Amino acid sequence: MTLPADSKARQAIRPVICYPNETLPKPDMPLYSAARETAQKINEVIIPAREAACFHVNAGQFFRITSVEGPQVGDLNLWNAHDLSERFYSGKTRALHGTHITTGERLWSSFPCLRPMATITADTLGWYGIDQYGGSVHDVIGTRCDPYTGNLLAGTQYHHCCHSNLIRALADETGMSLAQAEPHIHDVLNVFMCTGFTRDTGQYFMKASPVRPGDYLEFFAEIDLLGALSACPGGNCSTGHSSDEAACYPLLVEVFTPEAGSLTGWQSPPKNGYDQTHGR
Ligand SMILES: [Zn+2]
């Protein structure tokens, strides 16, 4: 390979942030935390190991995902409860907030809505930061483990990947067939998963999650949500996934509703303001 004479100079150009996010509408975290103080638990769902389940959260309520029996990562899908075409957009969330998300950051929805679906209000793994390998927790860089990639790489027919778990859960919740449910499954928030990209080859890596029973990630629902969470067959994702080999544990989802009047001044965010004429 011939190097251009100015290769070093071109590589030395400093990067600029693609989407400076200082102008993003800011969540009112003190309001959310005051409302959370008043909140009562109204529901819980246990996600069995290597399975998924759905849950509903109304706008203005909180939901918490907790590790309960052992270190376990979860793959989260979110939809507008009234319109499944509006769903979590991991790629744009990544572009706006970075590769991993934590307290004060938001889960954004697909076009044309592009609005916050949920805001992270608590993260007991917030201390982890970015480790020496470039790894961090709660990523929006992975996709979800799926049987097609397993088949491509290893010729397997494995049915408890997060993709299939989420399909079954959504089908059970809505009465859709598996074929109808599958196109609604989308790239996830990898809850508790510790991941990054290797510096030498840029490959997606995972390592044993630092999550321990009692750790949780909590969200404020900005719109009415249908959620689905899969307890990944990778367990803590220290070795592999797409098989029954890893030790796996359940995950707990709890929903909390704050007292009436505790969210005065908050409004469920409107759909994005772009007029959708696209130059015509
Ligand atoms: Zn998975």
Image (cartoon, grey):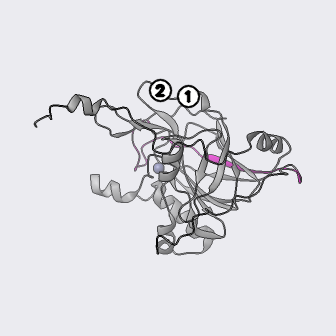
Residue 11 in picture, x, y percent from top left: 28, 32
Residue extending furthest front? 279
Residue 219 in picture, x, y percent from top left: 68, 47
Which structural element holds mark 2?
Answer: loop
In magenta segment, residue 257: yes
Q: Is mark 1 within 8 Å of ligand 1?
A: no
> What secondary structure characterizes most of the magenta part?
loop
Residue 172's quadrant in the figure? Answer: bottom right
Q: Is residue 212 above or below residue 90?
A: above
Residue type (three-letter) at the residue carrying disc 2: Asp
Magenta-highlighted residues: 238-261
Q: Horizontally, is 194 left or right of 61 in the view?
A: left
Q: Is residue 177 above or below residue 228?
A: below
Question: Dividing the image into 4 quarters, which one contains the N terminus?
Answer: top left
Residue 139 in picture, x, y percent from top left: 50, 43
Residue type (three-letter) at the residue carrying disc 1: Tyr
Identity of the residue drawn at 55% across and 49% down: 49
Q: Which residue is mark 2?
A: 131
Say whether marks 1 and 2 touch (CB < 8 Å).
yes
Identity of the residue drawn at 74% across and 41% down: 29
Residue 84 in picture, x, y percent from top left: 58, 68
Label 2 Cα crowd, 10 Å radius (few <14 / some 14-19 / many 20+): few
